[in-house]
Image: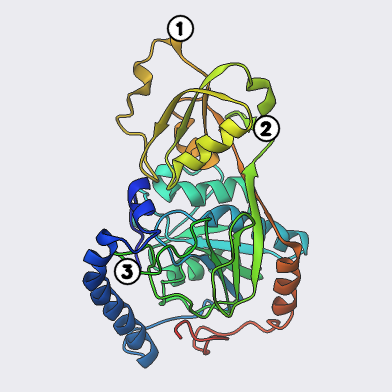
Amino acid sequence: MAGREQPPSAGLRQAWQTRGPAAWALWPTSLLYAGLVRLRRALYRSGLLHSEHPGRPTIVVGNVIAGGAGKTPVVMALVEHLQARGLQPGVISRGYGRSTSDCREVLADSPASEVGDEPALIARHCGVPVFVDRQRSTAARALLARHPGTDVIVCDDGLQHLALQRDLEVCVFNDQGVGNGFLLPAGPLREPWPRAVDWVLHPDSAAAPAGPAPTFALRRGLAEHAARADGSRIPLQSLQGRPVHALAAIARPEDFFGMLRQRGLDLARTTALPDHHDFTGWGEGKEGSGGRLPLLCTAKDAVKLWPLRPDALAVPLEVRVDPAFFTALDARLATLVAPVSLSSPPARPPVA
């Protein structure tokens, strides 16, 4: 439950939007899952399972639904806001999909295969300390040992990682919300909703999920440019009128393809691969060079694809968060002025 599952297929996500026959057939299994969630929370609450606070104000950005919700762009927007305030944030992550298992720092030139595609993207885009480990508290300790001037720790994913105590929680939703409201596998929920979080971010095109937490809208969209491997940019508009090949190895590849089409691009070919795919055995290279189309991919995919296809063009996903969210965040951070020790209790328990 604390791990990260492969994202569901588009068909399964659609089935999770209603309480149809398939959902009701799986509902008894979801009750067992719910029991395991409650038991795990109880074990942490009782202290039988150990949790730690990193010793700096800690913000967890995560979700309660299976599949992609666009957490990493929110993490990057949050980090950039903290930097603009003059703070020195650091990021911790599990590093899902990497070939290694140790705790390590993610550098600007770290291979995504060794650190995970999302941590590699954050390190290259934001230029902040990033550490990965399955146990986020281990990653946090290593981060602070190497970068003791870190003011705030941001955890990319981890609402269900109860071994890490946190001060603030941000729950991100996509436009499908909580779906049918059932837990896995009958619905999309990893844990019951509503649950206690500090803030909810949701697409401005969808209604805010019901719950007591303050909600703020965010807008997702593609950048006006595509980036080359060398860092140079070309206007996305310059690709209009030319057939292109679009590739995405993310939880919801159809979203990326749809946004490209909305920008007037002619997708002569699309390739949807599993989230965090490492492109091993990817057969696109069998195309003859004379018939090769311009290849567009997401920024997350580009950090793995560029060693194989240095001509690929990355189209970043940008998010615009309601400024009121950052106002609320700043007000809460102002109260977290004194660092806490590893043995101190969290500002708010990680379990309800």
Mark closer to the chain start, 3 or 1: 3
In-front residue for pair 128/224: 224
Mark closer to the chain start, 2 or 3: 3
In-front residue for pair 65/335: 65
Picture quadrant where residue 213 is located = bottom right
In-front residue for pair 305/197: 197
Residue type for callout 3: Met
Residue 197's disc is none
Q: Which residue is mark 1?
A: 290
Q: Which residue is mark 3?
A: 1
Q: Which residue is mark 2?
A: 225
Mark closer to the chain start, 1 or 2: 2
Q: Secondary structure at mark 1?
A: helix
Above or below, 66 against 339 in this view is: above
Instruction: Using the rendered image of the protein, determine whether residue 294 is visible from the camera's viewpoint.
Output: yes
Left or right, 329 with reference to 205: right
Query: Badges 3 and 1: C-beta atoms under 8 Å apart?
Result: no
Query: Badges 2 and 3: C-beta atoms under 8 Å apart?
Result: no
Most distant residue in the bottom direction: 46
Residue type for callout 2: His
Left or right, 117 with reference to 323: left
User: For the residue carrying disc 1, how many other residues have a C-alpha within 10 Å: few (<14), some (14-19), or many (20+)?
Assistant: few
Mark 2 and mark 3: span between their CA atoms? 38 Å
On-image quarter of the N terminus: bottom left
Picture quadrant where residue 235 is located = top right
Above or below, 40 against 291 in this view is: below
Q: Residue at x 29, y 63 (%)?
A: 23
Mark 1 and mark 2: span between their CA atoms? 25 Å
Residue 93 placed where, x, y %?
A: 47, 60
User: For the residue carrying disc 3, how many other residues have a C-alpha within 10 Å: few (<14), some (14-19), or many (20+)?
Assistant: few
Residue type for callout 1: Gly
